[in-house]
Amino acid sequence: MFGTGLLKGLGVTLKHFTDTFTDDRRKEPSRYEGSIKLDDGRRIIDQPITQEGLLTIQYPEERRLLPERFRYIPMLLWDTEIGEDRCTACGICAKVCPPQCIWIVRDSDENGKPITRPAEFYIDVAVCMSCSFCAEFCPFDAIKMNHDYELAVYDRYPQLVYDKEELTVPLEYYAALWPTQFAEEQAHRAKEKEEELRRNEEKKRAAAAKAQAKAAGVAEAGDGAAKPKRSKEELDALKAQAAAKAAAKKEGGADAGAVETGNAEAPVAEDAEAAAKRARLEELKRKAAEKAAQRKKEGGA
Ligand code: SF4
Ligand code: SF4
């Protein structure tokens, strides 16, 4: 029949309306159970959303307790443990921000050299779409999502362009808003620190073992004391000395060689001559003896 669907839809709306009414009446005595009363008299209600009806929160006198993962606009963390901003002005958040509503100016030292700290940090919260990309991509856990959604102001500029001062909150504030995530991050950081300490210890031990092995090797080679390193001037002077010595040796070596050669050849020549002399003498002696024998023989005859 025409209009049946329409009537069914209206029936659902009516059911929610009546359920919400009876739910509110039923919950009235325990309405503020577990709620937080603020200094200005307002209350933060912590009631589960029922299946039957809708819990009516009397905003602004009452507000709902937000779940941990609720996010609105980003906030910058001031690390109270080290007493400085966690942000290093790396610019990753500005790059990944889809509507490009982050501006960062990096700080510099007295010589104009850039340093890892933001001098200025702006977020146009009227443009921010609460996507949380900046918080997800920040490598230093420096930017997180705030729960504060009551940002109504009269003017767009400059009230809705938040500067560094407006964005910065202490670490404890973040810990109170995001207790589970904060605890997980702290545990992770502690683990990383422990790992870094272990690696440093290992490096130190390896360096000590290397130095010990080197010292033992030098001692074995019989040269316990390390030779002092010569300066460049000393080395040049030594080289010049060695070159001069080599040149002198070369010059004197030619003369010395000749003397040596003469000395070596002279005895050989002397010996040959003497031997020849001796041989001739022997020959003459033999001939003289033969003649004397012949004369004796002739005289006897
Ligand atoms: S908030 Fe994080 S990502 Fe953004 S500039 Fe700072 S350190 Fe880099
Ligand atoms: S939450 Fe999203 S839109 Fe907002 S500043 Fe971060 S990255 Fe940009």
Image (spheres, helix red, strand yellow):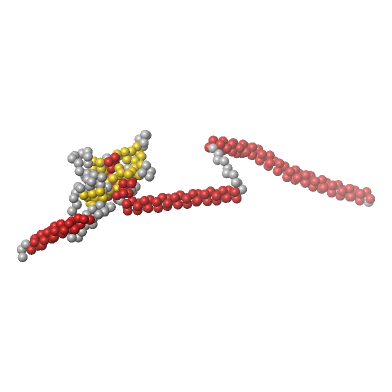
Q: Residue 52 in the image: x percent, y percent?
A: 18, 60
Question: In the picture, residue 167 is in which quadrant?
Answer: top left
Q: Residue at x 20, y 41 (%)?
A: 153
- Residue 290 is left or right of residue 185, and the answer is right
Q: Residue 172 in the image: x percent, y percent?
A: 33, 46
181 vs 157, nearest the viewer: 181
Q: Residue at x 23, y 43 (%)?
A: 124
272 vs 141, nearest the viewer: 141
Q: Is residue 190 above or below residue 248?
A: below
Q: Residue 26 in the image: x percent, y percent?
A: 19, 58
Residue 138 makes an appearance in the image: no
Q: Residue at x 37, y 34 (%)?
A: 110
Q: How many marks?
A: 0
Residue lying farthest bottom?
A: 1
Q: Residue 12 in the image: x percent, y percent?
A: 13, 60
- Residue 4 is left or right of residue 119, and the answer is left
213 vs 298, nearest the viewer: 213
Screen quadrant of the N terminus = bottom left
Residue lying farthest right?
A: 300
- Residue 186 is left or right of residue 125, and the answer is right
Residue lying farthest front?
A: 29
Residue 275 makes an appearance in the image: yes
Q: Residue at x 24, y 50 (%)?
A: 44
